[in-house]
Amino acid sequence: MNIALIIIFGTIVLSAFVGIFAGRKVKMNLENWTVAGRKFGLIIIWLLMAGEIYTTFTFLGASGWTYSKGAPAYYILVYGALAYTLSFFILPALWKVGKRHGLHTQPDYFIKRYDSRSLGIVVALIGVFSIIPYLQLQLAGLGFIVEVASNGAIASNIAILIGFVLTCAFVYTSGLRGAAWVAIIKDVMMILAVGVVGIGVPLIYFGSFGKMFDAIIAKAPQHLIFPGSSPNMDVTWVMSTALLTGLGFYMWPHVFGSAFSAKSDKIIKRNAVIMPFYQIPILLVFLVGFTAFLVLPGLANGDLAFLELVNKTYPAWFLGFVGAAGAVTAMVPSAILVLFASTLIAKNVYQTGFNPGAREETVLRLSRLMVLVIMAFALFFAFLFPNELVPLLILGYDGVCQFFPGVVLGLFWKRVSRTGVFIGLIAGIAVVAVLILSGNDPFLGMNAGFVGLIINSLITLGISLGAKPKESLV
Amino acid sequence: MQKGTKLALMFAAIPFIMLVFALPLVNRIEPVILGFPFLLFWILAWVVLTPGVLGLAYLCEKKYNAPDKGEDE
């Protein structure tokens, strides 16, 4: 057994124990399991939300994009800043509604605000279908990281299976609290790994950041401006994608639901102010991608750039550390994703749709059971169709973005109507699906999800203007 | 709408203007600042300035809006 393996396994097993330990003294009910009893303060909310944002996509995808596409990757840096700016206004209002009506999930909000169980069920189903590819991507990323970091000593499928068992264990026992505690370990390791590599590799190979960029300017200057080395990601694409993902970020059911776990609306507002600082490590990930572009040209898979560069530059134990950080980085978002997907099915499909009289303990028991079912489902697909993940994830992101008019107008505008939101949502999803499946993304240079969102918003506004006003929740 | 919220919204427009709508104007390599190509420097600078802008928005709301009552601790 080599040193890298010991570090990777030690870390993930320790993380799972910390996660299980987190829920030890808490009497588990639905409120404690899904929103941690609404007790989280500023620091833990910051770490939790960062835990949701910094996924394996950030680690591997952002460096991979910088490596293979160049400047279009900058949208990742931009959309976070936009999302946090919006959250400054949206999340505190949402938190108040959640507290007043005891909401746990996104469909809970739609059901309460629009007084429509069927709308809630549709929102829950769209949410679950969007989450599953996201979850698969995390599991696949975990397998990939461990396989490369252990130099092939652990096959990807075995790593996925181990990560799956450990993640299920701490979600099952501790719920959101478990994920938040593991997020602390993950954040510390991730920042160390990204800090050391991001600052280290440009200095080791070029002496300074400036000299590294000079080398790219000399070799391939177009890599540093839009559309970079991609065929169709020009400035219109970057603008529409940054806007869409910025607007859509808090519409992910798991991110939306986490907002309810804060102690107060002031905590969540202050959190929005400090969130953008968390974008700075992404710059370091970009620097790794750029350095790899010069040092390791011609990789068949750009997503390998980060790990291959670490492998080439650092000793084996540090590769193990990076692999461990990467594995925990997959486990935390997986935990949060599966937790909310399970709650959506138990609470908003089963209870809302089939058994409104179901007791809370029954819903919690079913949610916990669904953790295993959904993870198994994601695992199955990750093994069977490892290459279909990214298109599905894009479809999922474009799908959840369509919740934006219903959520935001619902918070701030009395007149918005149930019919408007319902038809707008369905139309938005239909436009996205048709554009993507017919190969028309980007459409007129714009991200397909953005086109869907415009049509969705216009329909929602149009129908609402013709409808009777309803009592506002805020 | 309260005065503090209006001011806060005006501040919040700044990241959107600088990080989205200004992009066609800053899509270039020169001038290189602190070693960074201009496009990356511009985006980075505004991402780092966003907490400052939101901090100002927070202070405006605190100063001009009527204090919230109840519910939060």
Image: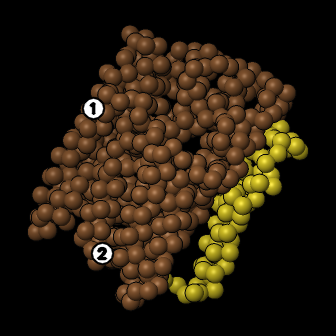
For the image, the number of numbered tags is: 2
Percent of width and height locating residue A343: 26, 55
| Quadrant placement of the C terminus of chain B | bottom left
**Residue at numbered disc 2:** A112
- Which residue is painted at 71% across and 64% down in the image? B17
Q: Chain of mark 2?
A: A
> Depth check: A259 or A189 in front?
A259
Dot 2 and dot 1 residues touching (CB under 8 Å):
no
**Residue at numbered disc 1:** A380
Farthest residue toward the right?
A: B31
- Which residue is painted at 38% across and 70% down in the image? A423
In the image: residue A392, left or right of residue A380: right
Q: Chain of mark 1?
A: A
SS for tag 2?
A: helix
Q: How crowded is the residue under tag 2: few (<14 C-alpha within 10 Å), some, or many (20+)?
A: some
Disc on the earlier residue, 2 or 1? 2
Image position of A263 with respect to B36: above or below:
below
Chain in yellow, by letter, is B
Give amino acid for label 2: Lys
Percent of width and height locating residue A451: 54, 59
* Distance from the alpha carbon under mark 2 to that under mark 1: 35 Å
